[in-house]
Amino acid sequence: MADSEENILDEEESSAEVEMGFLDHLEELRWRIIYSLLGIVVGTIFAWIFIDFFIDHVLLVPAKVAGFKLQNLRPFGQLFLYFQVAMIIGFIISLPNVVYHVWKFIAPALKHTEKKYVKWIVIFTTFCFLCGVVFAYFLMLPLTLKFAAGFGSHDIANNFSIDEYFSIIISVILGAGLVFELPMLSFFLSKLGILTAGFMRKYRRHAIVVIMFLAAILSPGTDPVSQVLLAIPLVFLYEVSILVAKFSQKKS
């Protein structure tokens, strides 16, 4: 009885989708983009209010720990840098809002039984991204900056441009956040029927070899310890992705 009611709801929603024209979809997309941008603006304003704290007590801490000095080589360089950092932090703060509106836009294509998971998907997506940010800040960045500060001749002072420093900081943090979205990517591909848990289990050994190879390339240090430290979370994410794919297939 419950299954028949859910099928009826799905059929009603499908017919509603047919009635929704192309221009209506564009209008819906426009408003979702506007809502997302408004969230980023609000997050950026919040970040700008506390920009001194984010700069001095968060982003500059890895440089202080590594023990090298930063230099600003452009007029108004710090001003533009502060704006850039505020926008990036604003995006990170507003990430749940952005993910929510992305899912609200694709919600008409979901089944009635799948829509109730949207809230948890938003939470899980945000959690994965923040885990990547934390991992990058407390593990990857110290290794990267320690290697950069200690490499080369002792007769050459390793003083870095503030632009280059923040470029490394931002790229590593955002890159790690995106890599930690691997379970969510597995969820999407499983829903589309492109990826299965059985396929991922079958090629687990191949995936581990690829992960170790990537860890060797992306590792900031040359020692095997840092490479293993980078490979461990990637292997863990792969195993989590298998579980996510299995769960997704059951719910399809």
Image: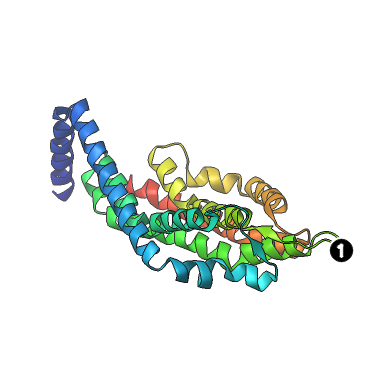
Q: Nearer the viewer, residue 96 or 45?
A: 45
Disc 1 packing (10 Å; few <14; some 14–19; many ≥20): few
User: In the displayed structure, does residue 227 sit left or right of residue 155?
Assistant: left
User: In the displayed structure, does residue 176 sit left or right of residue 152?
Assistant: left
Q: Amino acid at mark 1?
A: Asp
Q: Is residue 144 visible?
A: yes
Q: Secondary structure at mark 1?
A: loop
Q: Position of residue 250 (x, y in %)?
A: 36, 49
Query: How is the rendered protein coloured?
Result: rainbow
Q: Position of residue 85 (x, y in %)?
A: 47, 57
The residue at the far top in this view is 22
Mark 1 highlights which residue? Answer: 155
* Residue 64, quarter of picture: bottom right
Q: Is residue 228 visible?
A: no
User: In the displayed structure, does residue 42 sit left or right of residue 153?
Assistant: left
Residue found 26% across the figure and 37% down from its top: 29
* 29 is higher (above) or lower (below) than 166: above
The residue at the far front in this view is 75
* 121 is higher (above) or lower (below) than 185: below
How many numbered circles are shown? 1
Q: Position of residue 232 (x, y in %)?
A: 63, 61
Q: Quadrant of the C terminus?
A: top left
Residue found 45% across the figure and 46% down from its top: 185
Q: Nearer the viewer, residue 186 or 132?
A: 132
Q: Position of residue 49 (x, y in %)?
A: 37, 66
